[in-house]
């Protein structure tokens, strides 16, 4: 059943090629655009690469997995799965594992392109730590996205809420730097899952301590809380 469910999740993923293209192509576009605008390409890459990879992780979770789940609720397709021995936990876990490989292949491709095109130096030790925390961040976002996809009774409102959650996190911190906001807002927004994940990934990429600040703990709390909520509020229709 696990193989069957992973095949199902991959079919759902490739059924929406535009979302896949957006999630995989946008970081490459951003990389070449930003590095060509700045004289120090290496510094630009070291500051932004973790964020660009994180954007793809968020696209896979919110705009692919969760949005497609809400659509399947709307079309009543998930009713057929309800008649099988499939459990909610198995559905969520297989969804995570079916997309982890895609995320890792993309991350390797983006980093490899940065090495070839811009001579980006790498530290193998930092890369291993970075990959581990990238998977942690992906699981956190997947659980949050699945909760949002099931939080509302109607599937259509759930899709709208996914747009708000995704673009809201993309806007705050990624498009609008926190430094331009008042200190009070910086302190509050620093607890957003996207900001916490970016801080941890940036620390891992730079070889700094991932335990500095509250960010890793915040990620753990989000993962635990939304892991429970995503199972509790899961809907097949």
Image: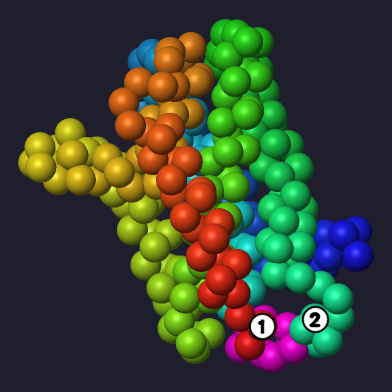
Residue 167 percent coordinates (x, y): 38, 59
Q: Main secondary structure of the magenta part?
A: helix
Q: Position of residue 98 (x, y in %)?
A: 77, 53
Please report the bounds of the magenta region as a residue range: 71-79
Foreground residue among 182 and 48: 182
Name the residue located 37 percent from the left edge and 33 percent from the top edge.
215
Instruction: Tell whether 5 sits left or right of 104.
Output: right
Q: Is residue 99 above or below residue 114?
A: below
Q: CA distance from mark 2 to mark 1?
A: 8 Å
Q: Is residue 109 above or below residue 233?
A: above
Instruction: Specify the quadrant of the image occupied by residue 113.
Output: top right
Q: Residue at x 55, y 57 (%)?
A: 227
Give the numbered dot on residue 81.
2
Look at the picture and state if 56 lies above or below 78.
Answer: above
Mark 1 crowd level (few <14, some 14–19, many ≥20, 10 Å Cα): some
Q: Which residue is mark 1?
A: 236
Label placed on residue 97:
none
CB under 8 Å between discs 2 and 1: yes
* Quadrant, the C terminus: bottom right
Tell me the SS state at disc 2.
Answer: helix
Q: Horizontal and vertical percent for residue 123?
A: 60, 8
Residue that appears at 48% across and 12% down: 207
On the image, which quarter does residue 71 sit in? Answer: bottom right
* Residue at the image point whose x is 59% and y is 74% from the top: 234
Front-lying residue, 137 or 216: 216
Q: Depth check: 20 or 11 in front?
A: 11
Which element carries disc 1, helix, strand or loop? loop
**Residue 38 pos. (x, y %):** 35, 22
């Amino acid at each position: 059943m696990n193989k069957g469910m992973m095949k199902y999740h991959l079919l759902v993923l490739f059924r929406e090629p535009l979302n896949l293209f957006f999630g995989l192509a946008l970081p490459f576009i951003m990389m070449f655009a930003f590095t060509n605008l700045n004289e120090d390409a290496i510094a630009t890459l070291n500051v932004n690469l973790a964020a660009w990879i994180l954007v793809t992780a968020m696209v896979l979770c919110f705009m692919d997995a969760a949005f497609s789940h809400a659509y399947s609720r709307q079309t009543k397709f998930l009713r057929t799965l309800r008649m099988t021995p499939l459990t909610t936990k198995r559905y969520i876990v297989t969804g995570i594992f079916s997309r982890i490989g895609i995320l890792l292949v993309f991350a390797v491709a983006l980093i490899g392109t940065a090495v070839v095109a811009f001579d980006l130096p790498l530290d193998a030790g930092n890369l291993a730590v970075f990959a581990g925390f990238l998977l942690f961040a992906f699981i956190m976002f997947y659980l949050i996205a699945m909760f949002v996809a099931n939080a509302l009774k109607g599937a259509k409102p759930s899709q709208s809420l996914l747009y708000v959650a995704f673009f809201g996190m993309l806007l705050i911190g990624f498009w609008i730097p926190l430094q331009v906001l008042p200190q009070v807002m910086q302190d509050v927004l620093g607890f957003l899952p996207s900001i916490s994940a970016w801080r941890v990934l940036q620390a891992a990429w730079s070889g700094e301590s991932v335990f500095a600040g509250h960010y890793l703990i915040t990620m753990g709390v989000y993962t635990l809380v939304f892991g429970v909520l995503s199972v509790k509020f899961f809907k097949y229709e």
